[in-house]
Image: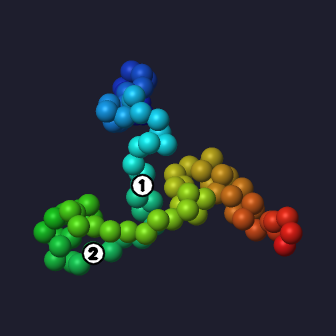
Amino acid sequence: MRREADYSLAPLFEEALSRRSQDLPELFCPTGAVWWAKAEVLRREGTYHIARRSGWEIPWARGVDIDNEDDWLAAELLLEMAERPRDGE
């Protein structure tokens, strides 16, 4: 969903509204963690979003987008959780 200017919610993918989320294709979101490109391609295209781009999947807990203090606090909590010993370790 996306929020419209009037704060109403609109679907990103109309065709997916009648399908279970488990039946939809996986979606991936760029984290901005690492980007690279050939200089000539970046100059020509003016963006990293080109037709044949590729990438690596980063677990959601390691790809936290920090834009404000709340995001920072959430990232700290995730780090604390990752550092805790698990049962049986």
Image label count:
2
Relative height, residue 83 to residue 5 (above, below): below
**Which mark, by number, is residue 54?**
none
Residue 27 drawn at (x, y percent)? 41, 51
- Secondary-structure class at tag 1: loop
Look at mark 2 in the image and give the residue it sits on: 37
Q: Quadrant of residue 52?
A: bottom left
Q: Residue at image x 72%, y 56%?
A: 77
Task: Classify 10 Å Cα crowding around label 1: few (below 14), some (14-19), many (20 and above).
Answer: few
Left-right relation of 62 to 57: right
Look at mark 1 in the image and give the residue it sits on: 28
Marks 2/1: CA–CA distance: 19 Å
- Say whether disc 2 or disc 1 marks the residue closer to the N-terminus: 1
Q: Residue at image x 81%, y 66%?
A: 86
Q: Residue at image x 42%, y 26%?
A: 9
Q: Residue at image x 60%, y 50%?
A: 71
Instruction: Tell which residue pokes out farthest to the front in this image.
Output: 23
- Quadrant of the rendering where the N terminus is positioned: top left
Task: Classify 10 Å Cα crowding around label 2: few (below 14), some (14-19), many (20 and above).
Answer: few
- Secondary-structure class at tag 2: loop
Q: Quadrant of residue 48?
A: bottom left
Residue 15 drawn at (x, y percent)? 31, 33
Left-right relation of 31 to 44: right
Q: Which of the two discs, 2 and 1, sits closer to the camera?
A: 1
Left-right relation of 21 to 50: right
Residue 7 drawn at (x, y percent)? 43, 23
- Quadrant of the rendering where the C terminus is positioned: bottom right
Q: Amino acid at mark 2?
A: Ala
Q: Amino acid at mark 1?
A: Phe
Q: Nearer the viewer, residue 18 or 44?
A: 18
